[in-house]
Amino acid sequence: MSGNRFRYGAWRDGPDPLAPPFDVRAAVDQVGGEILEGRNLRDALRDLLRQGPRGERGLDELTARARRLRREAMRRGNLDGAVTRSQALLDQALMAERDALNASDDPDALFKHAQLENLPRSTARAVEELSGYQWTSDEASALYQQILDGLRNEVLEQRFAGMKQALQGQGGPEAARQMAEMMADLNALLARHARGEDTTDQFAEFMRRHGEMFPENPQTVDELIDALARRAAAGERLMRSLSASQRAELESLMAQAFGDSGLAEQMSALTDNLRTLRPGLNWGGRERVQGRGELGYGEAAGALEEIGDLDDLIDQLGQDHPGATLDDVDVEAVERQLGRSAADDVRRLRDLERELRRQGWIQRGQDGMTLSPKALRRLGGTALRQVFANLSQGRRGQHDLRSAGAAGELTGASRPWEFGDEQPLDVVRTLGNAIRRTASGGVAPTPLRLQPDDFEVAETEARTTAAVAVLVDLSYSMFADGRWGPMKQTALALSHLVATKFPQDALEIIGFNRYAVRLSQQELAAIEPTRLQGTNLQHALMLAGRHLRKHPNAEPVVLVITDGEPTAHLDSDGEAYFDWPTTMETLRATLTEVDHLTRYGATLNTFMLGEDEGLRRFVEGLARRNGGRVFAPDADELGSYVVSDYIRARRGRRGGLAA
């Protein structure tokens, strides 16, 4: 063994067996990162599979390979090669026959010469007229018979992949008899299956008698039908892809090739059965396959079958239809067309998609995949960490997530738990109560069983609650000028901060363009920009006022994020009125809502994005009217400004303790 030599290299047989498993959380973060940059949620989820997790191949690369193979198949050759080959064999046969007649003393030679000279120009009609001709040349007779036998065998081999091996060594009549018998049995089986009858036993008997003609080794009737239907559909597409004259020539040649053996009738019945059982296949399509070579019937139909399979594969890999998942991809077809490594890539992506669903990161609804609340919490946490990272680097001081606030500081006292309490549990006093209740002789039993009367909760200082309305501009200019991503990140970060550190606060996110609408965290993450014109701040302020009035004891906080002055308002009929530039009617309607909020005690702080002079005049006038503040941050600093102002504003003017 000491003399053995080994060579080491990259693993080439499928996925690396030592590679680490895919990181589901990294995939979620990859999607979240794109969303925080302003990408559409649906597109981000789709791109994860299209482009693949970092370092992995995705569906786009596999689709590109499938398209390249399809282009190659489309350039494989001309589809009418069967007629062209028949014409070439006929020319050879006629040449050999004329030579034989010239050297013959047969008194009928002149008559035969005349017959050959007056043959129709159509190959199919010439072959038909020569069906009863008495050939002088054995070579010419063999060439003529080759036209018929070759075409018949090509058609049958295209439909039944194992026919050539199964009938090897058998003569024409015996082979034709076996084929007719097999197709009669097959048509009877398919007819029973189409009627909904149980064909398990009949299928087993059929495969016992004729299984050698089906090297795919189908295990069920449906698998058999799938294999046969793909080939039959390819044959039908071949006929439709020819010109009318080419199709007529080939159909006539095929009819003569099958003769009166009954094969033609059985083939027609088989095609009808398969079309009935698999109506969704492409039976009527046409393809323009061209190339330098001439393709025989089997080669042409095979090229079209491959093109059809690749078309189905491209459609499956595209994942464009509603509700599409990677479970829809035929992995066996991927391996057959693109190879084992491509099939392994699909399996890994499919496992990733399944694991994302199993672990609760994504969920499927009517509109396809969406992030689950669990994933949205992680996304909000990521957004908030980025905001605090920017804060820690700026001039505003340290704002670490762990110290950003809590629902009241502990006082050190505790009291018995009551139903509905939300204060934190005092674990030490709770366990102490249980021990004192159960201890016998100074020793507590194990395990220690708790009763409701044992529980105590820690008392905390009272804190001011806040009713917060964040108004975010959804006009198209926010997207066009690169502010859509920072807007999403800011709103998601604030939503996460309120949910985790200030759960007693009531937050509502309101988006506005021509109309205003309340947005959940999931809707915010998934929202897409539209080209609908209008900045209806009046409607947004109206919804904000309704939210604040639902929480009369909370500190009212209104934060407005916009890059344009108001250009729309609601008329008395509830319909939006839009005009640009801003009209006095829109300004008056907007300022009326500002006055309502001012009288209620809410302060409006505005975060102005952009350098529009009209916007600057408007927000400065709004600040003077309401007493709020105006900020003009860069888009990248928007989150830091908004979160900092929220923490400051929630301290409020109603005597609450600072956060």
Image (tube, rainbow, N blue to C red):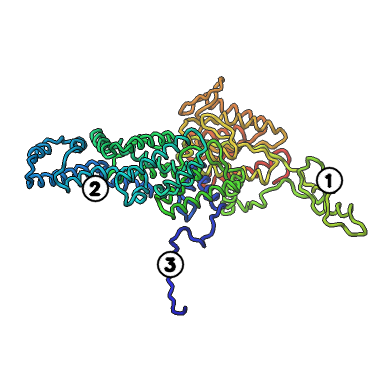
Determine whether the residue tagged by mark 3 lies in a helix, strand or loop.
Answer: loop
Q: Label 2 is placed on what type of residue?
A: Gly
Of the two numbered discs 3 and 1 in the rendering, the one whose residue sits closer to the viewer:
3
Along the line of sight, the residue nearer the viewer: 584 or 551: 551
Determine which of the numbered discs, if any, sits on residue 452 in the image.
1
Q: Label 1 is placed on what type of residue?
A: Pro
Q: Label 3 is placed on what type of residue?
A: Gly
Determine whether the residue tagged by mark 2 lies in a helix, strand or loop.
Answer: loop
Residue extending furthest toward the right: 441
Along the line of sight, the residue nearer the viewer: 565 or 192: 192
Q: Is any atom of residue 36 visible in this view?
A: yes
Q: Position of residue 526 (x, y in %)?
A: 53, 39
Mark 2 nearby-residue class (10 Å; few <14, some 14–19, many ≥20): few
Residue extending furthest toward the bottom: 2
Q: How many marks?
A: 3
Residue at the disc numbered 3: 9
Residue at the disc numbered 2: 293
In the picture shown, does residue 274 fall above or below 410? above
For marks 1 and 2 on the same chain, the one whose residue lies earlier in the sequence: 2
Along the line of sight, the residue nearer the viewer: 173 or 245: 173
Contact between marks 1 and 2 (CB within 8 A): the answer is no
Q: Is any atom of residue 483 visible in this view?
A: no
- How far apart in space, not on screen, are marks 3 and 1 (Cα)? 66 Å
Q: Position of residue 484 (x, y in %)?
A: 50, 41
